[in-house]
Structures are given as structure tokens and as C-alpha cells.
Amino acid sequence: MTPRALTIAGSDVSGGAGIEADLKMFQESGVFGTAVLTCIVTFDPENDFGHALDFMEPDTVQRQLDSTLAVHRFDVLKSGMLGSVESALVLAERLRTNELPYVFDPVLVCKGAGTMVDLKDLFVENLVPLAHVITPNLEEAATLTGADALTSVDEMAEAARAIHAQGATNVVIKGGARLAGDEAIDVLFDGETLTTFSSPKIEEHLVNGAGCSFASTVAAEIAHGRPVADAVANAKQRVTRGIATSLDNAIGVDSLFFGGPRDGDAGLPEVTRQTR
Ligand SMILES: Nc1ncnc2c1ncn2[C@@H]1O[C@H](COP(=O)(O)OP(=O)(O)O)[C@@H](O)[C@H]1O
Ligand SMILES: Cc1ncc(COP(=O)(O)O)c(C=O)c1O
């Protein structure tokens, strides 16, 4: 049976991140995907491509969720940018009455649009405890744990334990391009084992859509029934490729693209997995 996945996220009209990324990565992973839209991100070309966010009304979010949950039996549910407190609460309410595995990408940081720290407490109270997998980047993990900054794998490991203690079943903290050094390192803590996943950095700068594509691929892998550590390794491998074949754009951050020609794949770095 074809697995089915639902993403609850914002639209990134530049196409690298948001529901655009999620649906593409679901498709690339052999998963039927659909989306509930929470907000739309647009850019002002007259003003250095400054970001603007339009939020969906909570009632519209609720009707989208109720509709699609009535139409499909999903194998996994993933959330990205929720935009407003109200939309996050609508989602939390639906998740509490649902047994579906939930992959939570706690989007608090949008490249170029700053940090939505006002969602932090709401996330910790309402959504973190419902997450089967949570995938904060370095800045989001620092915000969730109240740390000033995370600057080493040891600090990432400590933060992963702290977020697990907040109730998430599996915590993946992504060092990515933000962690200093030549390697893009992610840390997974499942309550017992701490595993690191690393690969040589492809780019030093941030690539739009890396985080969304990573979380949606983790969700797709879980929909296929893969164990979480394998889901993380496979997602990281796919995102590495998507970064390597990303496209430039007028905003100046590359747009992740996974679906390009495969003839250069032999030269792509492998992801190394290590249990600590
Ligand atoms: N420059 C890079 N080179 C290789 N892998 C990267 C790079 N940047 C991010 N990654 C990987 O991509 C995935 C998503 O990273 P993340 O930090 O969430 O990206 P972002 O927040 O920038 O969208 C992680 O597995 C991370 O290690
Ligand atoms: C709608 C939306 N969701 C999520 C993100 C976060 O994207 P990333 O995967 O680059 O962290 C962005 C950033 O542009 C966005 O526009």
C-alpha cells in the first residue's frame, strides 16, 4: 500500500522550503502527500527581498485539517511553519485525539525573516510532548532549551537530552551549516542512545529548504515503516544531494533541489553514523 503523509506548513513561494519542499520530498520518497496551509511567505523585491507573512485564519486551518483527516488515513503527520499561536493550538488539539506518528519541525527561524520566539513556550507546552520525532536546527534547539547558543556536539547532545526530557520521543538536533567546522553534524537522542550523523559540508552558507526537506523526508521514511535512526540517515543523505544540486535565485540563498540529474551522485559525500 502506498504510504500517505500530511504536512501542516506554510507556503514558501520561492519554492525551496515550506509545503513546496515537503510535497516534493514526499513524492521523491514514494509517499502520497497532501498539505494544510498555515501561512504564506512573500518577498518584497523593492526592499531587499524582505519577508512578509500572511496567516490563514485558525478556522480555515481547522477546516483544512478536518477535511483531509476525513479523506485519508495517514501514516505520518509532519508540521513546519505554523505561523500563528492559534494555528499551533488547532494542530495540538487534533494531535491529542490522533495516534499518528508526528514529526515536528519546530520552525522558529526563517532565513531572512528572523525568529518567531513567541511560539517557544507554546511549542514546549503543547507540541514537543506529542512529537515522535522533533527536528530543531541549532538556533531552534537553543531557543527551546533556553541556552544562549549551541556551539559543539557535546552541547547539542546535552540539548537533545533536555528536549527529550520535555517529552519528545526522538530528538534530532541539526548542526548543519551553523555548527563551525568542515562537517555538517546532526545528533539523535532516542532516550537511550545518542547517535551522530555527519557528512562533509557542501556549502558554508545556509540553503533554503534544507530543514523542511530533512523533516519531510524523515516523515516519509517513517511512513514507509523505517526505524527512526535509518530515517534520519536516509533523510540526511537526500538533503546532502539536494544541497549539492541546489539552484541559485534572486534572493541570494540557494533553493534546495533534490530532483536533478543523477549522473554526479557517485561523487556525493556519504553520511557517517556513529553511536556515542
Ligand atoms: N552546508 C551543508 N552541507 C551539508 N549538509 C548540510 C548543510 N547545511 C545543512 N545541512 C544538513 O541539512 C539538514 C538540515 O539542516 P538545517 O540546519 O535544518 O538546515 P536549515 O535550518 O539551514 O534549513 C541537516 O541534516 C544538516 O546537517
Ligand atoms: C514557509 C516556510 N517554512 C519553513 C521555512 C524554513 O525553511 P528551511 O527549510 O530553510 O529551514 C521557510 C523559510 O524560508 C518558509 O518560508
Image (cartoon, rainbow, N blue to C red):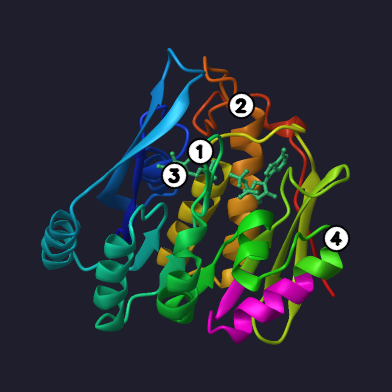
Callout 2: SS: loop
| Label 2, label 4: how far apart the Cα atoms are | 28 Å
Query: Residue at left 67%, top 32%?
Result: 265
Q: Is mark 1 within 8 Å of ligand 2?
A: yes
Mark 3 or 1, nearer chain start: 3
Which is more N-terminal, label 1 or label 4? 1
In front here: 143 or 183?
Answer: 143
Mark 4 within 8 Å of ligand 1, using the beta carbon: no
Tag in front: 3 or 4: 4
Q: From the image, state whether disc 1 or disc 2 is nearer to you.
A: 1
Say which of 143 and 189 sits in front: 143
Residue that badge 1 annotates: 113
Q: Position of residue 82 (x, y in %)?
A: 36, 55
**Amino acid type for the residue under numbered disc 4:** Ser
For label 3, the SS is helix
Residue 70, given in percent of the width and then of the height, sits at 11, 67
Residue 210 relative to residue 36: left or right? right
Residue pictured at 41% horizontal, 52% vertical: 81
- Residue 137 visible in this rendered orientation of the protein: no
